[in-house]
Amino acid sequence: MEKRSIEVEIFGHRYTLKTEFPEEQVKHVAEYVDGKMKEVAQGTKSVDSLHIAILTALNIAQDYLQARGNTEQLVRQIEEKTDRLEEFIALKMG
């Protein structure tokens, strides 16, 4: 797939991104980051964009790691239930 330029706006700044990802997905990610930065800016006294960006990155990383942990827990539960179901089927089939 060929890279193309997509223009996005995050926290009042325009960025031109070169990417292979679909434009709709890139814009969705940019809107998400923009929204998170605005949330952080409302909750802090800092007006420094870099400070706000770092706090936003930390918040997004925390959300990601929590979601990944939840996913891993669900996968373990599914694996355990699958193992029990396989044992049950093997027992019934003799």
Image (cartoon, grey):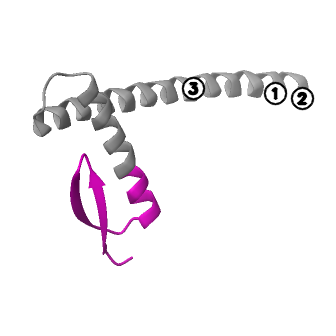
Query: In the displayed structure, does residue 34 sit left or right of residue 13?
Result: right
Q: Is residue 15 magenta?
A: yes
Foreground disc of the pair 3, 1: 3
Query: In the displayed structure, does residue 38 sit left or right of residue 73?
Result: left
Q: Is residue 7 above or below residue 30?
A: below
Identify residue type, mark 1. Ala
Instruction: Report which quarter residue 93 is drawn in.
Output: top right
* Tag 2 near tag 3, CB within 8 Å: no
Q: Which mark is residue 90?
A: 1
* Tag 3 near tag 1, CB within 8 Å: no
Identity of the residue drawn at 32% across and 43% down: 33
N-term mark: 3 or 1: 3
Q: Which mark is residue 74?
A: 3
Alpha carbon distance from label 3 to label 1: 24 Å
Identity of the residue drawn at 24% across and 35% down: 57
Q: Is residue 81 above or below residue 30?
A: above
Q: Which residue is mark 2?
A: 93
Residue 10, position as x, y percentages in the image: 27, 50
Identity of the residue drawn at 41% across and 24% down: 66
Q: Which mark is residue 4?
A: none
